[in-house]
Amino acid sequence: MDFEDTPEEAAFRAEARAWIDANAPKHLEAELKRAGFASSGIDSEDPMEASKAWQKKKAEAGWACLHWPKEYGGAARTPIERVIWGQEEGVYGSLSSPFIIGHGMCGPTVMDWASEDHKRRLLPPLASGEEIWCQLFSEPAGGSDLAGLRTSAVKADDGSGDWIINGQKIWTSGAQHSQWGLLITRTNPDAPKHKGLTMFFLSMSTPGVEVRPIKQANGQSGFNEVYFTDVRIPDDQRLGAVGQGWEVSLTTLMNERLSIGSGMSTGFPELFEFCLSAEIDGQPAVDDASVRSRLAQFAVKQSGLKYTGMRAITALSKGQTPGPENSIGKLVAGATMQELAMFALDIQGQSGAIQDESSPMNARFQQVLLRSPATRIEGGSDEILRNIIGERVLGLPGDIRVDKDVAFRDIPTSGRK
Amino acid sequence: MNLDFSDDQKQLQDQIRRFLSEKCTPAVVRSGLEGGEPFSRELYRGLGEMGVLGVAIPEAYGGVGLSHLELCLAAEELGRALAPVPVASSIYLAAEFLLQAGTEAQKAAWLPKLASGESVGTFAFVEGQGRMTADKVAAAVRDGRLSGAKSPVADGDIADLAIVAARSGAGRGEQAVSLFIVELNGPGVTRETLASIDPTRGQARLAFDGAPAERLGGEGEGWAIASQVMDRAAILMAFEQVGGADRALEMARDYALDRMAFGRQIGSFQAIKHMLADMYVSATLARSNCYYGAWALASGSSELPVAAATARVSATQAFQHCAKNNIQVHGGMGFTWAFDCHLFYRRSNALALALGSLSTWEDLLITRLQGANTQAA
């Protein structure tokens, strides 16, 4: 047991470190380090431009999308090298946030299902950050029950082979910045729900596509609604066969769960730092017995996640596939950061209710409090994650499905019971 | 990066698991519960012959001379099997005290017997209710004779020797405490078996009245040595707890697959499924923290005190969580004497207190993180 690199890993790390040292946007380092929970921290320049510039630079030097094949803009590196790169990139890695969905989910789906011509056209500018992708999956009627989606794709009656899309998507991160979208639709409402779906990609500037930001509960607008009104998509932008959309979407979702080694933070280091400086009755908060007990509870969760990540990296380093233990990351981190924020405000007393420049640590804990409910829902809610652990890891039976062999149009909905 | 055990180590773990599944039957585990011996001497000798007890003891002292990593995996298996044997007292503690602080003669005299299982050792530390502090140590040694009482002492009813924390010399506070080796079959020792929440492991009160005592380690260094050894033992104990947690989770999962209610397997109900998922989460976090502890133990890292407290807190919670919910998943059957659920529940709560309670270790963890923070700054 050790935390050391193999000689090959050490050589790669040295190479990555040297390149980052010579090329990273160091003028942004201080801003990135004091990034708030829900902001990039950059205000000296346009954050999106900063992200794109860094991504382009990486792409030109062969450091973008390390695990992708070279012909699609990647570097054909191993999974462990990708992890090492992430460790070395450090604070600059947060500049990649606009590309996460494209690189982590849309790109791999295109790679598995698109034609060679499309792959060569679409993937390199996605890798280099010149084009941004969004994932048009969730709908008002289909969140956790994704296959309950209702956005329809119907063959145009003009013999062109084109598809006409009508409907609405929701919770689309980054739609307002995206050039392309990965879109799942219903092409056959007479088939059972999972069998009548078809996947497409489309340009977000196609006529009839309208992006509207959603004002979130915390006042920010990271998500969007996307409306489709008679949007026309050529048939060659279909991914997989007609009716195969569910299978295609699983590629996307599997890739989401394969992104590892990022080690989601619970915010414990910041809470600990706060408790060292905050006071209760004139004494450091950390000296209070009840504070110590809660801190220890948070500490072991943070540590457990960290070393669970390292076990997954170990598997990668040995050329194995990481085990199911990695599926616990978001479930633990989401709930922990929410409890931790409530606890930090509790220590602040009645002033914990105030969220302004006087709030400790740039109002970090107030921000986490108001943003963390979304973490427990997005990308698989706590309940869906527990189902996944229960069914795929522990081998428990699925829930009994009343909608399984029923034509989609006959399934009861909130409006039609 | 290699936060995993080697193939050889895992193979050894498999051998131990097979041995225990054959020899550590439910009847053996339940002996103490049914009014018989809480300790299976035959099983213990078998573990000695197999080299499990001496796995981390150097060959020069009759051990196998492998590392603490192998001992971690042995501990996990003993925890899974609820083995009614004094390995924690004799190996994680007594043998470790001798290895860390013993003279050549003390090591040569005792370690071979502990490694073979011929003798059993324990650590006599606690004196009564509440968190143990140096000020509470009333047992004292004068002119090589120990007087006072220790209670509870795990495996004190069957142990042949005890490492006893007692007052001696002129130091104050923690420096007033030294350690002594006391032969429990010798003069001046009275044992009284105590009833406990986990009758699969014995507890006793030891009274000393002028019992011959030989100092282990330097005068006034007892508290510091004990703290060091208890950290090491905490990591091994955490592996026992993770082994128990995993087994309790498996039992609950198997029952949820088998048991039908309302015309379906109960594991298909989300109320049950989510409970099991949460048990898996606890057990996984604890296992990862234990691997961190194993690394610190084997590498002699300066992070050992943090790693020990982290593993201990995490594993205590995981075992308690899995054991109590195992009963819940089983429903009424889980609360019968005949089902094994209560054995895990009992053991999880007994192990939660051995070596100091959860709140004690939480407090230690924060103290140590503060220390690490100061060093970093």
Image (cartoon, coloured by chain):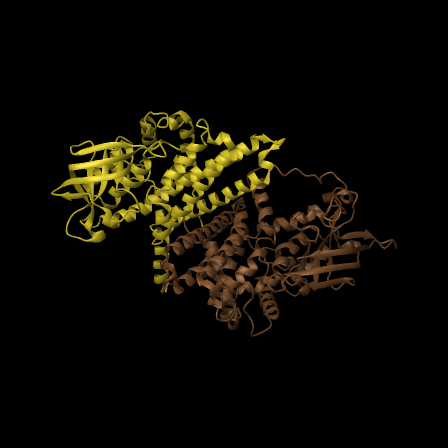
Chain colours: A brown, B yellow
Question: Could you say which is closer to the camera, residue A201 or residue A408?
Answer: A408
Q: Is residue A58 above or below residue B133?
A: below
Label total for image: 0
Q: Is residue B77 left or right of residue B277?
A: left
Q: Which residue lies furthest to the left in this view?
A: B143
Q: Position of residue A313 (x, y in %)?
A: 50, 50
Q: Position of residue A175 (x, y in %)?
A: 68, 62
Specify the quadrant that holds the C terminus of chain A. top right
Q: Which residue lies furthest to the front in this view?
A: A350
Question: Could you say which is closer to the camera, residue B337 or residue B187?
Answer: B337
**Which residue is found at the position 81% from the left and 52% from the top?**
A154
**Which residue is found at the position 40% from the left and 41% from the top?**
B239
Q: In this view, does A21 lie to the left or right of A48?
A: left
Q: Is residue A48 above or below residue B238?
A: below
Question: Could you say which is closer to the camera, residue B88 or residue B13?
Answer: B88
Q: In which quarter of the image is residue B347?
A: top left
Is residue A4 among the parts visible in the rendering?
no
Q: Where is residue A171 in the image (x, y as percent from the top left)?
A: 66, 57
Q: Where is residue A260 in the image (x, y as percent from the top left)?
A: 54, 52
Is residue B353 among the parts visible in the rendering?
yes
Q: In this view, does A398 lie above or below A359?
A: above
Question: Could you say which is closer to the camera, residue A326 or residue B315?
Answer: B315
Q: Residue furthest right?
A: A158
Q: In which quarter of the image is residue B352?
A: top left
